[in-house]
């Protein structure tokens, strides 16, 4: 069974600062997903990383994947308040012939002025 | 702009009620999922339907009964629930259950927030 661990679980950062969220997973996988969730809302897909060395950027967020290290990172550049949310990474596994995602515990990000 | 639609958005029910949650997608996806999410926790998989057949039931109590009438629709029938079943129920879809031939990305609906009294 795939295990996905994120750290930190809570992150309070000042506007304008940079920080990185880490996501480790337990079994070999060539892909990894990042989602964002605002309070009381559903999950919004941020990044789909499909191969070793994949890097994707959207605005102030950049995600990367190192399948050999079983590690993905979500880097935040010059944080703004609008980035405050909970960020989940998720890894895939195929069980009972079906494909599914296992989520990390999430990183609750608070960006303060 | 989610293309997975869930109804109702909010549901309050007593422990003796029978209700249903509904989910619809028009992306041509062949795999559909129910996840349960408690406050401040990650989503937990409940059921997976692949090509309209139930392929995974993650040891979910029988008071939750899924149904997939066709490839676009997914229902979750609720009966005799407990207060601890109060949660956000998320429906998701993906291109197919194999996952490996496509991106495997799951698209989530807005969720149905269930309160059991």
Image: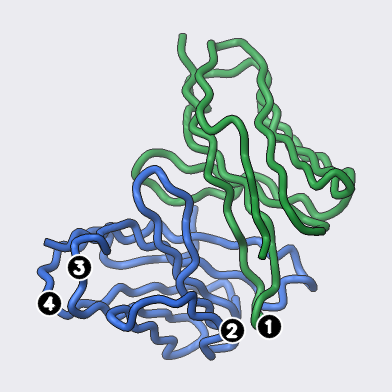
Chain colours: A green, B blue
Which quadrant of the rendered structure holds the N terminus of chain A?
A: bottom right
Q: Dot 1: few (<14), some (14–19), or many (≥20) neighbours within 10 Å?
A: few
Question: Badge 2: few (under 14), some or many (20 or more) residues near its Cα, within 10 Å?
Answer: many
Disc 1: which residue: A97
* Of marks 1 and 3, the one in the foreground: 3
User: Which residue is located at x 77 percent, y 58 percent?
Assistant: A27
Image coords of residue A32 (percent x, y)? 72, 52
- Residue B109 horizontal/vertical position (percent): 44, 61
Q: Nearer the viewer, residue B1 or A67?
A: A67
Kindly indicate whether the residue at mark 3 contacts the one at mark 2 (C-beta within 8 angstroms): no
Residue matched to label 3: B82
Residue B96 appears anywhere in the view: no
Q: Regarding mark 1 in the picture, which secondary structure is present there?
A: loop
Check whether the beta carbons of the residues at disc 1 and disc 4 lie within 8 A of each other. no
Label 1 to label 4: alpha-carbon separation: 34 Å
- 10 Å neighbourhood of mark 3: few (<14), some, or many (≥20)? some
Rendered view: A92 above or below B24: above
Pointer 1 chain: A
Task: Report the residue marked by disc 2.
Answer: B50
Residue highlighted by disc 4: B17
Asked if the residues shown at circle 2 and circle 4 are in contact, with their CB atoms under 8 angstroms apart, the answer is no
The answer to whether the residues at label 2 and label 1 have Cβ atoms under 8 Å apart is yes
Marks 2/4: CA–CA distance: 29 Å
Q: CA distance from mark 2 to mark 1?
A: 9 Å
């Amino acid at each position: 069974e795939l295990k996905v661990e994120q750290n930190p679980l809570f992150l309070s950062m000042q506007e304008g600062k940079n920080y990185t969220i880490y996501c480790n997973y337990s079994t070999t996988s060539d892909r990894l997903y990042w989602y964002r969730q605002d309070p009381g809302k559903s999950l919004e897909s941020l990044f789909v990383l499909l191969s070793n060395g994949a890097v994707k950027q959207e605005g102030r967020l950049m995600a990367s994947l190192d399948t050999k290290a079983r590690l993905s990172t979500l880097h935040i550049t010059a944080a703004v308040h609008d980035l405050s949310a909970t960020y989940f990474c998720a890894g895939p596994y195929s069980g009972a012939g079906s494909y599914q995602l296992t989520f990390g515990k999430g990183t609750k990000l608070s960006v303060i002025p | 702009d989610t293309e997975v639609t869930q109804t109702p958005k909010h549901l309050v029910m007593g422990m003796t009620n029978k209700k249903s949650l509904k989910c619809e997608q028009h992306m041509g996806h062949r795999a559909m999922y129910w996840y349960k999410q408690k406050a401040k926790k990650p989503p937990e998989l409940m059921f997976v339907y692949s090509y309209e057949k139930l392929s995974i039931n993650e040891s979910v109590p029988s008071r939750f009964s899924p149904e997939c009438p066709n490839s676009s629709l997914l229902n979750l029938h609720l009966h005799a629930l407990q207060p601890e079943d109060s949660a956000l129920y998320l429906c998701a879809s993906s291109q197919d259950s194999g996952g490996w031939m496509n991106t495997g990305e799951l698209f989530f609906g807005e969720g149905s927030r269930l309160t059991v009294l």
